Image (cartoon, rainbow, N blue to C red):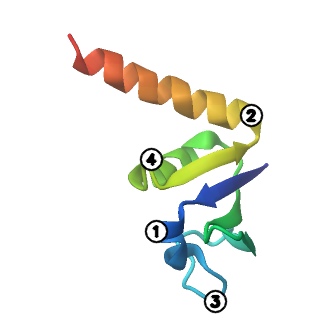
Amino acid sequence: KTATIKSTPDKARYFDKGMKKFLSSQKFKEKLDDGSIIFTLEYTHSLEILPFIQKWLPHLVILEPQELKEEYINNLNLILFEQSY
């Protein structure tokens, strides 16, 4: 599977073309006018990439696939609600 990820402009330099990859499957796709970067990550199971994305919270946004984005949002909601008890 392939996840498409967007980095916010303030952290985009870490994901720019030619920079050292954090994960071997990481591929630069494009730099947007606002300075953000779009890149992809290949994965077979969400646990391969979700911890990485969470580490960069709130600077990385999952654009697709929708099911990965929903899983991530559900995980974040669980963390927030579990912390409130």
Earlier residue among tags 4 and 1 = 1
Mark pair 2, 1: CA separation: 25 Å
Where residue 17 sits in the image (x, y, percent)? 66, 84
Mark pair 4, 3: CA separation: 23 Å
Earlier residue among tags 3 and 2 = 3
Earlier residue among tags 4 and 3 = 3
> Please, which residue is most extreme toward the top here?
85
Question: Taking 64 as reference, is 14 left or right?
Answer: left
User: Neighbour class for label 4 at 10 Å: few (<14), some, many (≥20)?
Assistant: some
Label 3 with label 2: CB-CB less than 8 Å: no
Q: What residue is shown with label 4? A: 54
Secondary structure of the residue carrying tag 3 is loop
Label 4 with label 3: CB-CB less than 8 Å: no
Residue 40 found in image quarter:
bottom right
User: Neighbour class for label 2 at 10 Å: few (<14), some, many (≥20)?
Assistant: few
Q: What residue is shown with label 3? A: 18
Residue 78 found in image quarter:
top left
Q: What residue is shown with label 1? A: 10
Question: Taking 81 as reference, is 77 left or right?
Answer: right
Label 4 with label 2: CB-CB less than 8 Å: no
For the point 57% across and 77% down, the residue is 21
Tag 3: amino acid? Gly
Report the disc number at residue 46: none
Tag 1: amino acid? Asp
Where residue 35 sits in the image (x, y, percent)? 61, 72
Q: What residue is shown with label 2? A: 66
Give the foreground label among 4 and 1: 1
For the point 70% across and 46% down, the residue is 63
Label 2 with label 1: CB-CB less than 8 Å: no
User: Neighbour class for label 1 at 10 Å: few (<14), some, many (≥20)?
Assistant: few
